[in-house]
Image (cartoon, rainbow, N blue to C red):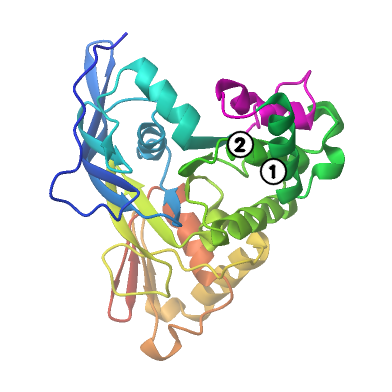
Amino acid sequence: MKKEVKEDKIVGKDYEHLIVVENLHKTYLLGTTAVAALRGIDLTIDKGDFIDIMGPSGSGKTTLLNLIGGLDTPTRGKIFLEGRNISMLNDNKLAEIRRERIGFVFQFYNLLPQMTAMENVMVPLHFSGDLSRRGKRKRAMDLLRLVGLDERAHHTPSELSGGEQQRVAIARAFANDPSVVILDEVTGDLDSKTGIMILNLLRDLNKRGATFVAVSHDAAVSEFANKVLHMRDGKLTTEGEIGGLKETKIMESTRKRGTEINKEKCKSKIFQYLFLNQGKTEIKMSEIKLYIPTGIINNLPEHFEDILQELIYDNNLSAKIDGELLILQ
């Protein structure tokens, strides 16, 4: 068990931010080899944010999520949750923080198979002495009603669809009224239609004041986030609110909210664009250059940006805009 280290508070800093990450580093040892998973992350998260962390496999996004969620501790740097430094707490203190202040929703639901939906939602409440048995049942039912599943309260996971199981998991995450909810590949085990339904539910909860920090390989998640963080090689490459194509070194996510993507249709439009503009398009082994006239930059084919994002992250590329030139490398 890790030795207890004296806590510190944020001194002389703005307390408005729910979470503050300062110069965060995480290094793992693989045998005798040191692998740097995070390299100096600085980040602020405010109450009511819906943050989506994107990046290729090995970029460090899951490591960052684990550190924010109190599932691991950094090699160097600090994490403040509501002004409290949680980065150097021992295992018992971190477990207390997770129980009381942080909710989790995982890709595979992690429901207890022998318990009903209501009983699964009640599990976190058993670690709190604030409610009676009757009070816990009422709290669980209220949460199931919130996610539209109160009529399935007495069904076990095997009697529920994947989307219904994820709704139970979301209800469970809110059992102890957490400050932030961690979403780990929350749509990863769902079909696209069900995934959109879950994301719509999360957006509704976000509008009610819930704070979410998500990582996902499902690019549709960024449609529902108010901030998208792009990671590469253990560093944040951009942070900003959702917007259109901008002249930034790294292209920001530009999906329209609430739309479901037909990837094949989108890909065909990309190839159509490339074909029609082949005189102004250069394709090399390690680089694609697209010339996009300023006059049409906001009138590109539907989801053009979505497929560019897919190309970027599936192939570990970077993107930048230089006037009318979009370069993928």
Image coordinates for residue 253, horizontal then vertical, percent: 44, 63
| Residue holding disc 1 | 143
Image coordinates for residue 193, horizontal then vertical, percent: 74, 54
The label shown at residue 175 is: 2
Q: Which residue is found at the position 76% from the left and 31% from the top?
A: 118
Give the farthest residue toward the bottom: 295
* Residue 247 occupies quadrant: bottom left
Q: How many marks?
A: 2
The span picked out in magenta is 107-131
SS of the residue under disc 2 = loop
- Is there CB contact under 8 Å for labels 1 and 2? yes
Image coordinates for residue 128, horizontal then vertical, percent: 55, 25
Q: Which of 199 and 254 is in front in this view?
A: 199
Disc 1 crowd, CA 10 A, few/some/many (<14, 14-19, 20+) = many
Can residue 190 be seen in this snapshot? no
* Residue 134 occupies quadrant: top right
Q: Which of 267 and 18 is in front in this view?
A: 18
Image coordinates for residue 127, horizontal then vertical, percent: 56, 21
Q: Label 1 sits on what residue type?
A: Leu
Q: Does the magenta stretch include residue 149?
A: no
